[in-house]
Amino acid sequence: MFEHSGSRSRSNLALVFSFFEVTFHATARKVRKNHGNAVLSILLSIAQSLIFIAAFYFMFSVLGTRGAAIRGNFMMYLMSGIFLYLTHIQTVRGLMMAEGPTSPMMQHGPMNTLVSIVSTAMSVLYIQTISMLCIVLLIHVMIEPVEIHNWEGAFRMFLLAWGSGVVFGIIFMAVRPWAPDVVQIVSMIYIRANMIFSGKMFVANMMPSIMLPMFEWNPLFHIIDQTRGHIFVNYFPHVTSGSYPLYFTLAALLIGMMLEHNTRKHASASWDAKR
């Protein structure tokens, strides 16, 4: 009796280690998938972020709207919006295109959709985290010293931007086999809408109350504004909430995993012909 219990316990532990091992290798594969080199993937992510920052810096300078930003490090104001937006969107895109139950990768014994989801999410988080740290160091060394009022809170919001992207990506991934064209259009609309409704170009406290309902539905709007509250010592978010995006993410995760389970249950190899 005791030998059987110990054997089962060791077996369960072996399954856990096997899952993490497969996830690690799948994550490393995801990081190198597009460019064959993890360093190149990180450099391209840094370049994309720098292009966005340069474009918005130029736009703010030409329009003369820098005075509407939060008093403090202007580069960190830009980065707090742009980088969280990019992290969220890259995660949505990555999860949406992750291997599903009919992917050839699922023919390998240890591989399953949970490993695919976790490895894709972790690969995006790895690349975006390294990119963020490199850009912050670049700003600190070459432009002006970077001071973050509450870096722990700011990093929690960064993780929440990534996590909310994960749940949106899972939902799109689960629905895509049933209606690939519709999901492609809806995801494109969502990504384009977040260019404005994420609030990365605005200070939420300074927005007219008549405009707030157009933004408050979006968890990323709350995340970006709360992040600025953690970064800047003289900014206190009054119109956004830190709990709303968290509860939204948890509820959407539950819905996404239910949809993914239903899709996996009805998986058919003929779906590949639709893509």
Image (cartoon, helix red, strand yellow):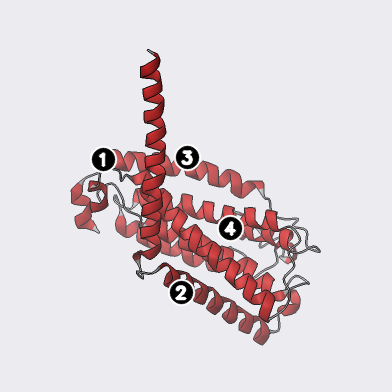
Q: Earlier in the sequence, mark 3 or mark 4?
A: 4
* Residue name at image x 52 percent, y 73 percent: 46
> Upstream in the sequence, badge 2 or badge 4?
2
Tell whether 15 sits left or right of 232. Answer: left
Q: Please, what is the three-letter code of the amino acid marked with disc 4?
A: Leu
Residue 194 seen by the camera: no
Between disc 3 and disc 2, whose residue precedes? 2
- Whether residues under marks 3 and 2 lie with C-beta atoms below 8 angstroms apart, the answer is no
Q: Which residue is mark 1?
A: 266
At which x and y percent is residue 223?
63, 56
Quadrant location, the C terminus: bottom left
In the rendered image, the residue lying farthest to the front is 3
**Numbered label attached to residue 44:** 2
The residues tagged by marks 1 and 4 sit, at their Cα atoms, a distance apart of 32 Å
Residue at figure coordinates x 26%, y 48% from the top left: 106
Instruction: Tell me what residue is drawn at x 59 percent, y 43 percent.
Output: 247
- In terms of image quadrants, where is residue 150? bottom right
